[in-house]
Every structure is written in structure tokens, then in C-alpha cells.
Amino acid sequence: MPAILFVCTANQFRSPIAAACFLRKLTILGIQSDWKVGSAGIWGTPGLTAHPKAVEAAKEIGLDISKHRTRLINVNLVNSADVIAVMESRHKDAIEADFPQARERIVLLGKLSKVFAGEITDPAQDKFTQSEVAARMINTCIDQAFTKLVQFAEAHQIQQKI
């Protein structure tokens, strides 16, 4: 079963929306049960709900993340993921520093999608005034990078079997 982990800073906005977008795409294609989809934060507090602005923004693009609870990245999540999609270069750097075994499985979602410059900035930086824009950006990135993410995860699955 392929596994993908979406990672942002606190796991309260970008990564839960990205995971929900990816899961929706899998569901539309009828392959949801074949995948393990999750999200985590680099820094933050485990067990919190998604930020209220994230819940609103997700609803605007047809997603419900109201039941989401935050998690911090850990060795079990890293080791079980075939691909780790991060929002910013600093997330990639942090994961590589703490989990060097994951280096080859980390991708920058914005860069992979070739839609944006690579960084999907944290909407908290502007006090969530652009929350809907951020959610749409993440959705676009998932749409554009979906096939590459699937291929990347499947390729890792094949390598693991060799």
C-alpha cells in the first residue's frame, strides 16, 4: 500500500488541506483504499484542531477538515511514507537533518507541481487574510503534481521490494 505524508509547520492549515485534496483525487479515481494518506507538522502541538481559517478555506474548495487533529512528524511517520511532500524548503531541511534516511523521498510540493516558485507560504504569516487563496493554491498544486506524486510513491514501493 503506497503511503504519502504531507508536511507543513504546525499541521493546522497547509498539510491537512493537501492531504484532503490528495485523498479526494484518489477517491474520484476509485483508488482510495490502496493508499495511506496523512499529514504532520515539523513544529507545533499534537492533538489540536485545524485552524478555523483552514476549515473555512477548505470548505470553500469542497473539503471537510473539521475532524483533523495535528500530529508532529516522527520516525514512524517518516519511515512508513513512500513520499513526503513539504510546503517549504525549510521543512525539507528540517526533515533531512532529523531523518537523513528520508532524503530521497522528500519533495517540495510547489516545485513538483510547476505551478508556483516552489514555496507554499504559511497563511499565518499574513494573519490568514489570504486563506482561501492558499487553499486554492494547494488544491492546484495537488492537481498538477498528482501523477508525479503517485509515480514517485509507486517507484519507492518497487525499490523497497528489490
Image (cartoon, rainbow, N blue to C red):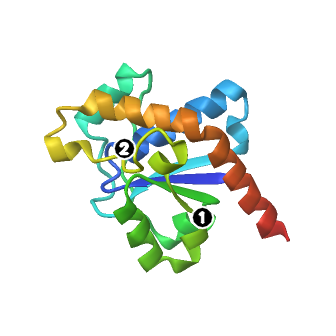
| Residue 51 percent across, percent down from the top left | 26, 40
Q: Is residue 121 left or right of residue 141?
A: left
| Residue nearest the observer in this picture, 157 or 37 | 157
| Residue under the point 78% across and 67% down | 159
Label 2 Cα neighbours within 10 Å, binned few <14 / some 14-19 / many ≥20:
many
Q: Earlier in the sequence, mark 1 or mark 2?
A: 2
- Evaluate whether residue 2 shows in this view: no
Figure label count: 2
| Residue nearest the observer in this picture, 51 or 102 | 102
| Residue under the point 49% across and 38% down | 141
| Residue hosting label 2 | 14
| Residue 107 percent across, percent down from the top left | 53, 57
> Residue 95's image quarter?
bottom left
* Mark carried by residue 105: 1
Say which quadrant the C terminus sits in: bottom right
Label 1 Cα neighbours within 10 Å, binned few <14 / some 14-19 / many ≥20:
some
Is 27 above or below relative to 109? Answer: above
Q: Amino acid at mark 1?
A: Arg
Is 104 above or below relative to 139? Answer: below
Of the two numbered discs 1 and 2 in the rendering, the one whose residue sits closer to the viewer: 1
- Evaluate whether residue 109 shows in this view: yes
Is 102 above or below relative to 68? Answer: below
Give the structural element (helix, strand or loop) at label 1.
helix
Gap between marks 1 and 2, in whole Å? Answer: 19 Å
Residues at marks 1 and 2 touching, judged by CB atoms closer than 8 Å: no
| Residue under the point 42% across and 41% down | 116
Give the structural element (helix, strand or loop) at label 2.
helix
